């Protein structure tokens, strides 16, 4: 995936760095991108990798971030799936985990009602097959 490369300007932890270039902010763990935020569109981000879960992305997953008190809410609006965290990074991590959990659970169900069926259809537009081990 072609990621913006810029100056590292802040550390979010021992293994995470934030880089910025032309209004795009990318958060990485080691060399794996966790998500990208476009500072020109406040409160929007995109999940760009699910490598830590062993899944490939068909396309980036749009995420809306809202602040509620001292919590951050990360929402994948197309599928009406949201979680919270004490930071943006925590909220996005939690959302990624929930998306994979729901994808796996719903994919293994033989009978789904209309709402879970629509959620699974949305998730399938973004989440691909499990990555093959090298």
Image (tube, grey):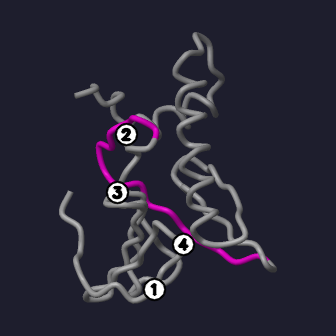
Q: Quadrant of residue 105?
A: top right
Q: Quadrant of residue 68?
A: bottom right
| Residue beneath disc 4 | 13
**Residue furthest out toward the top:** 110
User: Nearer the N terminus, badge 3 or badge 2?
Assistant: 3
**Quick one: quadrant of the C terminus?**
top left
* Residue at disc 3, secondary structure: strand
Pick the residue in front: 7 or 129: 7
Q: How far apart are marks 4 and 3 (CA)?
A: 14 Å
Q: Distance between the residues labelled 4 and 1?
A: 9 Å
Neighbour class for label 1 at 10 Å: few (<14), some, many (≥20)?
Answer: few
Q: Residue at x 25, y 89 (%)?
A: 22
Q: Which residue is drawn at 23% across and 67% down?
A: 3
**Residues drawn in magenta:** 53-68
Pick the residue in front: 43 or 119: 43
Closer to us: mark 3 or mark 2? Answer: 3
Percent coordinates x, y for residue 52 in the rendering: 44, 44
Percent coordinates x, y for residue 128 in the rendering: 34, 34
Q: How far apart are marks 4 and 2 (CA)?
A: 32 Å
Q: Residue at x 71, y 61 (%)?
A: 84
Q: Quadrant of residue 40?
A: bottom left
State the mark number for residue 10.
1
| Residue beneath disc 2 | 125
**Residue furthest out toward the front:** 14
**Quick one: quadrant of the N terminus?**
bottom left
User: Nearer the N terminus, badge 4 or badge 2?
Assistant: 4
């Amino acid at each position: 995936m072609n990621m913006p490369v810029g100056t590292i300007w802040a550390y979010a932890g021992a293994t995470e760095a934030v880089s910025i270039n032309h209004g795009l902010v990318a958060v990485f763990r080691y060399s794996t991108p966790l998500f990208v935020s476009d500072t020109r569109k406040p409160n929007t981000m995109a999940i760009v990798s699910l490598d830590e879960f062993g899944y490939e992305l068909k396309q980036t997953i749009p995420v809306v971030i809202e602040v509620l008190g001292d919590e951050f809410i990360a929402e994948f609006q197309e599928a009406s799936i949201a979680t919270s965290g004490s930071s943006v990074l925590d909220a996005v991590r939690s959302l990624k985990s929930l998306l994979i959990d729901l994808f796996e659970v719903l994919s293994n169900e033989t009978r789904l009602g209309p709402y879970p069926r629509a959620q699974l259809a949305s998730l399938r537009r973004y989440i691909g097959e499990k990555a093959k081990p090298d």
